[in-house]
Image (cartoon, coloured by chain):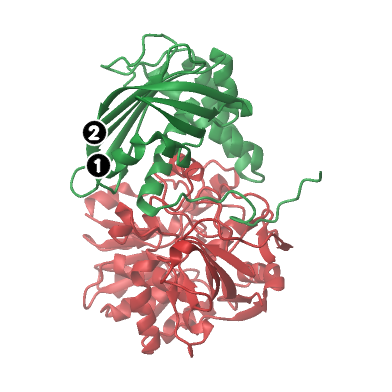
Chain colours: A red, B green
Amino acid sequence: MRAVCWHGKHDMRVDTVPDPEITNPRDAILKVTSTAICGSDLHPYDGMMPSMVAGDVMGHEFMGVVEEVGPGVKGKLKKGDRVVVPFTIACGSCFFCERTLFSCCDNSNPVANQDLAAAAMGFSPSGLFGYSHMLGGFAGGQAEYVRVPFADVGPIKIPNGIDDEKVLFLSDIFPTGWMGAENAQIEEGDTVAIWGAGPVGLFACQSAFIMGAAQVIVIDHYPHRLELAAKFGAKTLNFHEVKVRETLTEMTGGRGPDSCIDAVGMESHGFSPDNIVDWVLQETHLGTDRPHVLREAILAVRKGGTVSVPGVYGGFGDKIPLGAFVNKGLTLRSGQTHVQRYMPKLLEMIEQGKVDTTFLISDRMSLEDAPKGYKKFKDQQNECTKVVLKPH
Amino acid sequence: MPTNSLANLGRLTDELMPTLEAWGKRLRNVDQRWLVIGGATLLAAAVVGGALAVRQKGKRMSDKEDDKVIARAVTVNKPRAELYRYWRDFTNAPRFMEMAESVTDSGGGRSHWILRGPGRKKLEYDAVITADEPDRLIVWESAPGADVRSTNRIEFRDAPGDRGTEIHAAMTYDPPMGALGKVVATVTQRSPELQVLRDLKRFKMLMETGEIATTEGPGAAPAGRKQKSH
């Protein structure tokens, strides 16, 4: 089959690779009908994600039609079912899955790969599709077919009559934005500041309003992305034009936002001294992440407030304002999305028209054009907000 | 717990080195520098730490100075009795112990083990159960005269709250060929320290989900690797 494969920094290629096969009883094989490039795919694209190996198949946002099921999936899924698959793989029966902490699943990352993750993080999280060997080395879904482990737990069935594009983002970015807002512990009347008007930030923005925020302020530097946020009723700040922290303080009557959401993660922009030092550290591989946004969020949030971090970090960040964290009495909440926890509720919201998911897609292309898609998504972030690939 | 901090470092090195070395060979791009710096630091520590013996505080599992004791634990979301029953039937061992190729029950507490050894050698030996408390404890060791000297102790304890069962495994391992064998074992990534925890985790996966997560093989995880020509 054809698949998008990582071959190094800024080197995505479409290769012919073996077809996936049922390997474990609870596997299913999916024929992929739609798949997207994620903002977090840009971290491996930029050579920032450790433990990638040349030839790895990319892609963790995908949906399609069930082609084959293993004997352990009986009853839950059958050939021909149309499903969206969560980007995190969860067994459903460990301590963490039972508590709906699906992205912390004990049993989905193969044990040899767990050694690597545990060395970096203490304990291994769940396996992920198409996102490095530390997280399992699973082939991703930017391909014609994909093997889905624990297919009786993850995939959600989609009724006929709903377009792929309406539901594809249930795989990752919509639940991620939702959980990012949920982790911000928003109360009725709150002001929420969101760094990053990418797909996750924009879903977090919609979610924050649904959760009762009275004011949502979105921060970015791409005018078109800020326009999209404004369409949802957000106020917008361009960090090239204003001093973010001072403006946030003014806009909240001198208090600071009640909650701050970092929907940017490890490759933040910004021309501040701390970010330049981070850049140097990152290029010389002595530090790995650039947490400029996280620092700013901790300093900007009101006393006793909450900082929610859906933005992806992979390694270590330097000089986090711990003094502010402690003395302002903050709450910091994060996590890879527990997608399985949110999918049914969010599907219902899509069916009821309560959330717009299609506004985001700026580019549609065939799988063969994926390398162009990556380059455009990276280099033209103002116009290019989401790239959807069609493998068949 | 070892009382000597350098011994700690030596053990940590022994655990991490195979993983780091194996990944260092396979990775391209930016990660190599990170691994080389980290690996070099740990290698220096290994030279110092590797020379020191490790002892388990309290119970001595072995009389020999050279024997290492490896202790690892895992928590499994299943009742103690169920896990004891499955483990006690040693013919199940190959399902989750990566090095066990086959085990036959010879009766009377004796079993015959065939292991995949370092460098793809096969090791065969007889084992004898020396302690067996149902639902609580199994101790078995290689029979006198065996090529491999090993003692294995598996303890099953109720985990707090509703977490299921804690399994505490301790084993001594006197590798064939002594120190040389150990180096070979480490380089081929079959070091005992890694192996014990990996086997425990595989046991956990099998018990909790009925299968063992894998990405081995082109059918399990297709990739655009260059095919080796024959």
Work out whether residue B92 or residue A299 is closer to the camera in this orientation and state it: B92
Q: Classify mark 2: helix, strand or loop.
A: loop
Which quadrant of the figure contains the N terminus of chain B? Answer: top left
How far apart marks 1 and 2 lie (CA) works out to 8 Å
In the figure, is residue B163 to the left or right of A11?
left
- Residue reaching furthest to the front: B107
Q: Chain of mark 1?
A: B
Q: Amino acid at mark 2?
A: Pro
Looking at the image, do the residues carrying marks 1 and 2 touch, with CB atoms under 8 Å apart?
yes
Considering depth in this image, is A337 or A331 the residue closer to the camera? A337
Amino acid type, residue under disc 1 in the picture: Ala
Chain for numbered disc 2: B
Residue drawn at x 45%, y 60% as measured from the top left: A89
Numbered mark located on residue B134 in the image: 2
Instruction: Estimate how packed mark 1 is, as few (under 14), some (14 to 19) or many (20 or more) residues with alpha carbons within 10 Å.
Output: some
Q: How many marks?
A: 2
Q: In the picture shown, does residue A363 fall above or below A284? A: below
Q: In the rendered view of the protein, which quadrant contains the C terminus of chain B?
A: top right
Compared with residue B149, is residue A127 higher up or lower down, i.e. above or below?
below
Residue A237 shows in the view? no
In this view of the protein, can residue A369 be seen by the observer? yes
Q: Establish whether labels 1 and 2 are both on one chain.
A: yes
Residue projecting furthest to the right: B230
Give the x, y percent position of residue A193.
35, 70
- Indicate the position of residue A37 as horizontal and vertical percent values: 58, 69
Residue A144 point in image, percent of width and height: 64, 70
Residue bearing the label numbered 1: B81
Picture residue at 51% right of the left edge, 56% below the top? A24
User: Which residue is nearer to you in this view: B28 or B2?
Assistant: B2
- Of the numbered discs in the image, which one, if any, rests on residue A79? none
- Label 1 secondary element: helix
